[in-house]
Image (cartoon, coloured by chain):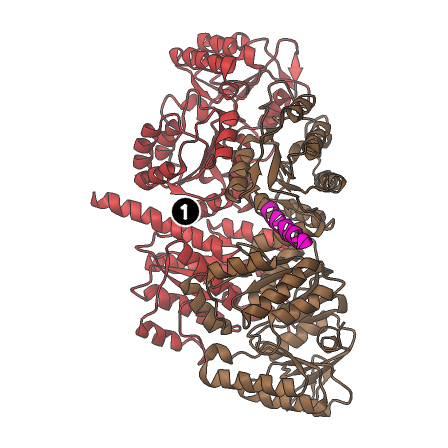
Chain colours: A red, B brown
Amino acid sequence: MTKRFAPLFAPRSVAFIGASKDPRKWGFNMLNTFIRGGFPGKIYPVNHTEDEILGLKVYKSVSDIPQGPDLVVIVVPPPSVNAVIRECVSKGVGAGIVITAGFAELGGEGARLQNEMVDIARRGSMALVGPNCNGIMNPWEKLHIQFVEFFAPPGPIAVVAQSGNVLDSVVRQVMLRGMGCSLCIASGNEADLHIEDYLEYLADDPQTKVILSYIEGFKDGQRFIEVASEVSKKKPIVMVKAGKTEAGAKAAMSHTASVAGSDAIFDAVCKQSGVIRAKNLDELVHIGIALLQQPLPQGRKVGIVTGGGGWGVLAADACTELSLEVVTLPEDTIRELDTVMPAWWNRGNPVDLVAGRSREAVFKGIEILLRCPVVDAVMMLSIMPAMGFERFRASAGKVDKEIVVQAVVEAMNEFNQLAQKYGKPVVAASEQMFSDAAQETQINYAVGQHNSICHQFPHQAAAVLAALASYGEYLERNKLA
Amino acid sequence: MTKRFAPLFAPRSVAFIGASKDPRKWGFNMLNTFIRGGFPGKIYPVNHTEDEILGLKVYKSVSDIPQGPDLVVIVVPPPSVNAVIRECVSKGVGAGIVITAGFAELGGEGARLQNEMVDIARRGSMALVGPNCNGIMNPWEKLHIQFVEFFAPPGPIAVVAQSGNVLDSVVRQVMLRGMGCSLCIASGNEADLHIEDYLEYLADDPQTKVILSYIEGFKDGQRFIEVASEVSKKKPIVMVKAGKTEAGAKAAMSHTASVAGSDAIFDAVCKQSGVIRAKNLDELVHIGIALLQQPLPQGRKVGIVTGGGGWGVLAADACTELSLEVVTLPEDTIRELDTVMPAWWNRGNPVDLVAGRSREAVFKGIEILLRCPVVDAVMMLSIMPAMGFERFRASAGKVDKEIVVQAVVEAMNEFNQLAQKYGKPVVAASEQMFSDAAQETQINYAVGQHNSICHQFPHQAAAVLAALASYGEYLERNKLA
């Protein structure tokens, strides 16, 4: 970890300036969540009037703290923030997170205060996150500087978002999928540290395998292109860009003082820098997880195996709309499929399994497509036949629900093994027919524990394949360059 | 219920022709699921060689059944189907569901057999569903003719789908949302009964409040326009149309022998007939549920209240992209909002609540927007402040998870009451910050028990509002006409 970022992302001691006893206040909630998150280092609440908060000794000011702190979290009202930062600089504090809002996003005096803030911090070599943000999380260090009490487990996914509530949404989606995070940053107004600084850091962070991001606007578009182009060569960046429309851009300006810029230009920026653009927040998470373990396709030709005809039609539409090609299968592949399919199969792509195929036939079918030289990627839909559902039925025909979760995990793991074997992605989407809602949740979680995802609908799987293809194309272009 | 449909949708006795003891066969699974579904009438398995299946006396043929049946389910191989239908006609059976595949979707001999089938049935006044389908469900009658064992509770949502697995997907989404179905029909190849017949029936079905449909192609486009235009005046039809692309259309042809037709023409058809087009299956369900209890907006001007800035930006983008207007709030509305918002609020639309607002302030804010004459609909995002989250915290600051579900239900009910009071829709989207995955599932279910839905993401809420607006416009045009 670079010296600059060590106090921010791996501090040994953290002070909360503006800590409070009042459960309605941020100064209470941030500290409370932090304590519950299990931070192993020193915690110093700072407050003028209290002696003890949540069982911890309170200090009157940063200056009173005997040793450190490495990092300060600032939740005092806007007019007091800069004085606090000055004091921190004097004390030699290396990094600060300014939670407080009311700066550049209000314009006028707020903007002036923010400029002053940056000036003080930079002259004092203090790295600043925010202002107008809701914290950072480094689950590997049990560092949970966040408002709401939920704790992402450590994992491979980094999230950087200009919006705190979007950050929380994305992190929670990752958690519901049974996965964990390397570093989560609400970058807020990005007064001092910008998205580019975080990307540079994450490029070399050994825990981070993929970077998810939500952005409303860039402070320095040219630097973003330069940094993102380099980072993308090392690990993928997936991004949702908000402020696409006039109404959205207006909202972005009053939210984080971001100038959204032209959406068409951002599309071009993504193409140039290898950034994978996601349409919305669920797509962002889906693509991120897929990138963790799927091989990248060499092209855009897709073979589809489906347990249900309707899903095949929807998938073919979704692929085509995303410039993936539902490829015409060569005659020898059809002949190979003939050996595992019933006589009346549709002899086309999507390969419709026709209900009731055996588990073995499904996997053979997928493997035949993976071996086919014109197929770059396989989509498997409606995985019920791949689960070998006849196994679940006792003689009375009742489904044994306890082993359904395991059957999905096994099927997904076999898809992944085939993907690795042939170096081509195999993405899956399926309803979980044998499960009630609680069990479906369990399935998502259990599958995620294997770094995997079974999408709910075909259009989601298609979006993921298109993203993998685009990223593969970027890497290919840069290999040749 | 019309005489023609009574034996199909409310039979007193059902025969399964091709019933089997082999758990790998449809003839076993369909019968098994049907028995478990709790049908209160007579059940007659028909099989040449068995004496008893699943504890029921087996008949050698339909002719041997002493009384009835009203309805037959046919799962024999394709070459035997028409002989069976002939026998049913002789016996005076009123309706049949042909599960068996291998007809028009294969072309050639299959198409010839299907024509013959229709001919026999129509001359014998026997109504036929399918072939190449996976059944129908009427939960009000405990009639569960379906392959997989899950039982939708009775409710207000009808589903008609040309694809059986899409039908199951949609019904399951409805169930996961805590809601129920009036009638679910897998229409398959639509040899005899077409989508238009089902729509005509559902228009007058007192249990059905909204119709969801998945279609690959129409047998008679002109009749569809005529029927749908009339039905739409009584209750809304929401539809996903597959086969939009060349690859999708090809897949549709080999799936249900459907000619998909031009997508642009289908868009025009929807506009003309009041059919609400959904982009994908989850949108289909979301829109359907919203139509159950939301007033229709008088126009496309939206006011947004958000508990998180980033969500507001995403919502503004999503609304604009769907031709909803994020309206500029008049000065007196801003002044009214000043009375409930903190001094530094953004004084714009979206109305950013700024974290930590009281529950009361949230509802007052929504009501101010609803009273504003230029606002046609309200979107509420990130409902945490509306839940009064400070209520969940004991002195130690721990969230009492047991009442979180109840708090969401209460907030959603209050939104709905405000919507009714002002005759304008209030749609909500929120992360459930205080919940783990299992609890999120519980929340969806509990909210659904009140005919309501809290969307996961802003773009989903925007899609629902746009659908409500389009349907409102159709009804308005037809009122004037």
Residue toward you, B114 or A405: B114
Left or right relative to A69: residue B19? right
Left or right relative to B232: residue A177? left
Residue toward you, B59 or A119: A119
- Residue A396 visible, this angle: no
Is the residue B185 above or below the residue B302 in the image?
A: below
Residue B162's x, y, as percent?
Answer: 56, 68
Identify the main secondary structure in magenta: helix
Element assignment for label 1: helix
Q: Residue furthest left?
A: A481
Residue B24's x, y, as percent?
Answer: 57, 76
> The numbered mark 1 sits on a residue in which chain?
A
Q: Residues within 10 Å of mark 1 (few under 14, many from 20)?
A: some
Residue B204's x, y, as percent?
Answer: 73, 65
Residue B159 occupies quadrant:
bottom right
Looking at the rendered image, the quarter that the N terminus of chain A falls into is top left
Residue toward you, A280 or A47: A280
Count of numbered circles in the view: 1
Name the residue located 50 percent from the left edge and 34 percent from the top edge.
A248
Q: Badge 1 is on which residue?
A: A292
Q: Is residue B470 magenta?
A: yes
Name the residue located 41 percent from the left edge and 69 percent from the top edge.
A365
Residue A37's x, y, as percent?
Answer: 57, 30
Name the residue located 62 percent from the left edge and 63 percent from the top edge.
B228
Amino acid marked by disc 1: Leu
Looking at the rendered image, the quarter that the C terminus of chain A falls into is top left
Name the residue located 75 percent from the left edge and 75 percent from the top edge.
B6
Is the residue B432 above or below the residue A457 in the image?
A: above
Left or right relative to B283: residue A246? left
Q: Is residue A37 magenta?
A: no
- The magenta stretch is B465-481
- Residue B21 visible, this angle: yes
